[in-house]
Image: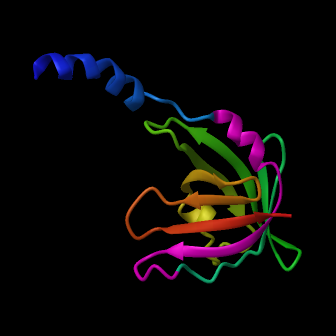
């Protein structure tokens, strides 16, 4: 029994120490349309005060609502203990009274579904997720 465990130990260590594929950050660049939000206490998401996201090659972002800028800033990749890319959104809002998830709750995991759907998933517990479609 112990010899089987010892034989599997290197494999388990290799799997548990995988780092995120940071080349996926390049896939964020472009224009994105809000598809839906989810999560929160009810799981139903929230009414987003934005409908469009623009990300450039430097990972600077602009959030729009009806072609008007509502927030802008930069995206930083943070250290992650998982295969997922952990992001932090640092920015400012045009209207400081408006709650904007990517600014006010700025930690998200990045996940792609094919090349045309991007998910920003909250790291834990009753927080919100945002799903975007590539334009």
Count of marks overlaid on the render: 0
Q: Is residue 120 above or below residue 79?
A: below
Residue drawn at x 62%, y 83% as measured from the top left: 47
* 27 in magenta: yes
Q: Quadrant of the C terminus?
A: bottom right
Q: Give the percent coordinates (x, y) of residue 45.
A: 54, 79
Q: Give the percent coordinates (x, y) of residue 18.
A: 47, 29
Q: Quadrant of the N terminus?
A: top left
Residue drawn at x 80%, y 40% as measured from the top left: 58
Q: What is the quadrant of residue 11 in the picture?
A: top left
Q: Is residue 14 above or below residue 81?
A: above
Q: Which of the colour schemes (rainbow, by chain, secondary structure, one colour) is used?
A: rainbow
Q: Residue furthest left?
A: 1
Front residue of 103 and 22: 22
Q: Is residue 57 above or below residue 39?
A: above
Residue drawn at x 69%, y 40% as measured from the top left: 24
Task: Magenta stretch: give its range.
Answer: 22-44
Q: What is the quadrant of residue 101 in the picture?
A: bottom right
Front residue of 1 and 47: 1
Residue drawn at x 42%, y 83% as measured from the top left: 42
Q: Residue furthest right?
A: 67
Q: Give the percent coordinates (x, y) of residue 4.
A: 19, 21
Q: Give the percent coordinates (x, y) of residue 65.
A: 80, 77
């Amino acid at each position: 029994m112990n010899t089987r465990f010892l034989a599997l130990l290197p494999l388990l260590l290799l799997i548990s120490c995988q780092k995120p594929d940071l080349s996926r950050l390049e896939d964020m660049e472009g224009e994105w349309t809000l598809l839906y939000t989810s999560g929160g206490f009810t799981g139903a998401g929230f009414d987003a005060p934005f409908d469009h996201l623009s990300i450039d090659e430097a990972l600077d972002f602009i959030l729009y609502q009806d072609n008007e800028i509502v927030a802008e800033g930069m995206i930083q990749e943070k250290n992650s203990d998982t295969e997922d890319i952990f992001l932090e959104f640092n920015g400012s809002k045009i209207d400081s009274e408006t709650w904007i998830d990517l600014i006010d709750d700025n930690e998200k995991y990045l996940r792609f579904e094919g090349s045309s759907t991007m998910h920003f998933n909250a790291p834990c517990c009753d927080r919100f997720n945002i799903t975007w479609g590539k334009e």
